[in-house]
Amino acid sequence: MCEYGIHYTCFSLDSKVLFSKFLQPIQELENKREMALAAAFNWMPWLALGDVANVGQLTGLNAVQLIGMIIRAANNARMHKKNCRQFAQHLKLISNLLEQLSFSELTKREETREPLALFEESLRKAVVLVESCRDKSYLYLVAMGWVYVNKFREYEDEIDKYLKLIPLISLVEDSRKKLKAIEKDRKPYTLENDELKVQESLLKRDLSRKNSSSLSRKDSSRLSRQLSKRYPGLPLTEALRTENEMLRNELQVMKARMEVQHCNVIERLIEVTENENLPT
């Protein structure tokens, strides 16, 4: 764990050992094909959620306001759209519960102050997660796809856990019913089929190694189609230039944090934007 609170793990093992190492953190993936894809990465930084200052900038907003931000950001997500919508739907149930309990009163009670602080800190991290699905590079979000999926699951569990720690919620009968409904509302976070296919294409190129082979014609066509969808009306050369700029900005952030393995992957993605002859 670095001083910024960001975790990452990097392995340079053969594929069989890699699979066993990654099996536990991705045990909830829906089938063997998905687990094999995630295991194929020999890098797995836990999600670098943009500039850590973003979380600090959200200090002072209460839980209902933070949930409102997440719902709005989910509506504007450009990647992980389904995951963002499902996450927002789950938090809407929580917002309804808090509003019913008169959230302003909860904030005044001394016994609720600490659990509320933990709850709101989890929501602040969730805001940055969902907003990154709008703001970050398409290639970056695809390459980090399963890391994002795991983060949606992790944050949902964390938010629900701290919600249950807030006194008074379990004392009101109607609130107990809503709390049970929230507990049962388990969302199936995953990657869309198109995202999986592009990730497969990038995996074939082996993003962890310099001078790796170029994409096949089929994979190049697939990536070209998805970039065109991501940047409608924009020439492919301009889309690649935009991706390149976003990746270079991300690279500077990771260099400042000395996330070496993460930097290596971003550099390989930059190579994709500069060296691949994608069909127009």
Image (cartoon, rainbow, N blue to C red):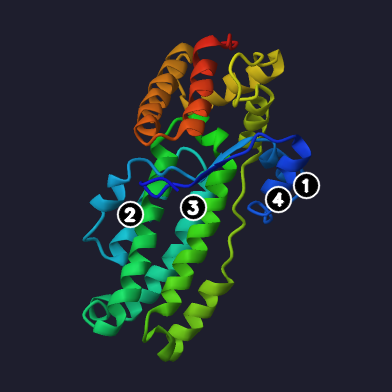
* Upstream in sequence: badge 1 or badge 4: 4
Mark 3 falls on what kind of element? Answer: helix
Q: Quadrant of residue 41?
A: top right
What amino acid does circle 3 point to? Answer: Arg
Disc 1 marks which amino acid? Lys
- Mark 2–mark 1 contact, CB under 8 Å? no
Residue 253: x %, y % from top left: 35, 32
Q: Nearer the viewer, residue 156 or 5?
A: 5
Mark linked to residue 32? 1
First reached walking from the N terminus: tag 2 or tag 1 = 1
Name the amino acid type tagged 2.
Met
Label 4 element class: helix
User: Which of pointers 3 and 2 lies earlier in the amino acid sequence?
Assistant: 2
What's the CA distance linking mark 2 and mark 4? 33 Å
> Label 2, on which residue?
69
Separation (CA) of disc 1 from disc 3: 25 Å
Is the C-beta separation of discs 4 and 3 under 8 Å? no
Callout 3 crowding tier (Cα within 10 Å): few <14, some 14–19, many ≥20: many
Q: Position of residue 274 (x, y in %)?
A: 49, 12
User: How far is mark 1 from mark 4, CA to CA?
Assistant: 10 Å
Q: Which residue is mark 3?
A: 85
According to the picture, the residue beneath numbered tag 4 turns out to be 23
